Image (spheres, rainbow, N blue to C red):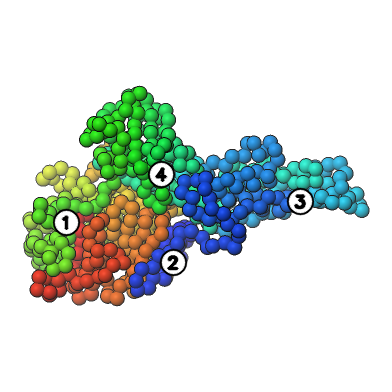
Amino acid sequence: MRSRARRPLLALLAAVAAALAVTGCVSMPSAGPVLSYPVTQETGGQNGQNMQFIAQPPGDGWDPQQIVNGFLLAAAAFGNQSQVAKQYLTPSESKTWNPSWSAYVYQTSPSVGNPVYQAAGPKQGAKNGKSGKASKAGKQAPKAATVAVNGKIQAIVSSDNGTYAVPSASGSDGSSPLPFELVNTGGQWRISWAPQDLLLTPTQFADDYELRNLYFFDPNYHYLVPDPVYVPLQASASTLTTTLVGYLQKQPADWLAFGASQTAFPASTKVVSATLADNVATVTLTGKISKVQLAQVASQLLWTLVGSGQGSSQVESLQLIVNGKPYYPAGTAANPVQNKSQASYGPATGASAAGASATTASPPFYYLDSAGDVYSRAGVGATGKQTLITKLGAGYQQIAVSKDGKYLAALSHGALFIGPIGRPLVPEPGAGYATLSWDPTDNLWTTTGSNDEIYVFRTGVSPGTRQAKPILVTVTSDYGTPTGQLYNALQIAPDGVRVAMITDADELAFGAIDWSAATGPGLGSVKISLSLSPFYVSNLTSGFEAVTWYGPDNVITLGGPGSTLTEYPVNGGTPTSQMLDQTVESITAIPDEALIAGVYKGQMIEALTLTGAWASIVTGGGSPVKGISPTYPG
């Protein structure tokens, strides 16, 4: 049996949510259980919403092991309780110990070892370093000690970019002992050296950190791509603003690095300051920067600082000062302050206008009928307008339409056919194709299921041309080479940068698409870099059958028990599930539109929200619309 790395933190909670889903909405909290400690309301951080236990100062005569244990608990308490943690330190260490945003997250509570004593000091009225009467034997009290903290590290949060990095299964797991150095001063032990990182349990981490999104650009500078990071709740709104702006200046250094995404900040531009007042973030830049780059930088800043993801934000708008002058974005000539709705760029949502008209209320979805005819249908309920697109003939089980509505792909018993809509489809080489997904540049991505292969057909290389053969995609992983995995399903995100995959029927993983450097999307070689960060779900009990993107920040899966649909925020936030009372065979979604599911015996159902009421898609006369493989473009 192949051994695979598992990410137990928020992803495990998400898997449990899917496994325990019942009819109706099931939400799993992403924070830990309520602790039986006295609590206090945190007021110095970003949102002042989390409740934390009151840290306790060191007790009289505590031994080194007790001191380290107490320090770890006090250090984990955020906000104004950092002064309690410093009471465990020597005066000199208290001045230098200033934990940054970095943290080690242990799978369980780290083990605090027994003290190893060093040199003995002169006779004192203490025994084994404790205050009190001198021992009858007159033993000399130890002067220094080392206490090692051990444990299996689940993840490391970097202060450089806020990323949640899972140690590689093929390399070091970062679980080497961390030594704390202590000295005995006046019969009391105090820590003379401590790591500048917080050592946390998963529960403490969930209490102390929250998710935020950084936004970078896709390789073509068309869309913003969310990159989830963790930030400490104790950070003030002003500090958070400054730090997030600093993150955006640098190229991504995590799973979205190496060509998958990039920052719009030119290397010649310097951020002089980033301040926050009256909910307006003011960012001052110097250096050479074009108008196009300014619009891109402003969009990155707005989407990042105003906040998206799980966290809240005190930033409502942005003002850019460039080389001493305010920047006036297009359409705001009289006001240099802009909000997110005025950003020139934003995340790709997945919504498509293909086939829509000025009188069409909703973008269409497509489906096959029993005769193999392809229809589009816009609108919900009995008011939807139905249009015959093309006649394929019987024998097809699945279709996919490109985001721009120009191309159609279809599967017939594992054989793949591609062509412009309205023209005959062309059979492609190979067999065993299982799933279809179009990216924004009209490239078709396919999996071959049990053959462990992923291919890209470059339909949109240039008008009227086709490549000679598809590209075989290389798959890499930060948790070991994914050899022997079955690629059951694959869906490209609306931005064309990220991919959601179901592997081995029981894992939901995410990766970044990296086209070869010199050629760009649609050309050359390509690889997918799967990652345990930011999000990974293992559902060994019931597994997964299908996945669809539901905008830039969410996917919806189809899996057990029964026909359970689960919406997962791809930054690792709280999932929501609903079990349907019909046998669901497929699911398709785009933001702000009805979810469409294909059910048993060629029926289609729809709902305005995942947890809303599901109803059959019917004609004007109330008869059910028969169709298979319903799909939105993409």
- Please identify the quarter of the rendering in which residue 18 is found: bottom left
Q: Judge whether residue 347 can be spotted in this image.
A: yes
How far from the left and from the top, in percent, is residue 373?
10, 65
Q: Amino acid at mark 4?
A: Gln
Query: Taking 615 as reference, is 566 left or right?
Result: right
- Give whichever of discs 2 and 3 has the lower sequence position: 2
Question: On the image, numbered disc 4 is attached to which residue?
Answer: 314
Q: Nearer the viewer, mark 2 or mark 1?
A: 1
Q: Amino acid at mark 3?
A: Asp
Quadrant location, the C terminus: bottom left
Circles 2 and 3: CB atoms closer than 8 Å: no
- Where does label 1 land, which residue? 363
Amino acid bearing label 2: Val
- Between 474 and 586, the one nearer to me in the picture: 586
Q: Secondary structure at mark 2?
A: helix
Left or right of residue 404, residue 208 in this image: right
How far, Cα to Cα, is label 2 from label 1?
A: 34 Å
Q: Earlier in the sequence, mark 1 or mark 3?
A: 3
| Mark 4: few/some/many CA within 10 Å (<14, 14-19, 20+) | many
Q: Please indicate, yes or no, whether residue 293 appears anywhere in the rendered image.
A: no
- The disc placed on residue 16 is 2
| Residue 376 figure quarter | bottom left
Q: Is residue 118 above or below residue 579?
A: above
Residue count near mark 1 (Cα–Cα under 10 Å), binned few <14, some 14–19, many ≥20:
many
**Crowding near the residue tagged with mark 3, few <14, some 14–19, many ≥20 C-alpha atoms within 10 Å:** few
The first of marks 2 and 4 along the sequence is 2
Residue at 54% x, 53% y is: 41
Q: Are marks 2 and 1 in contact (CB under 8 Å)?
A: no
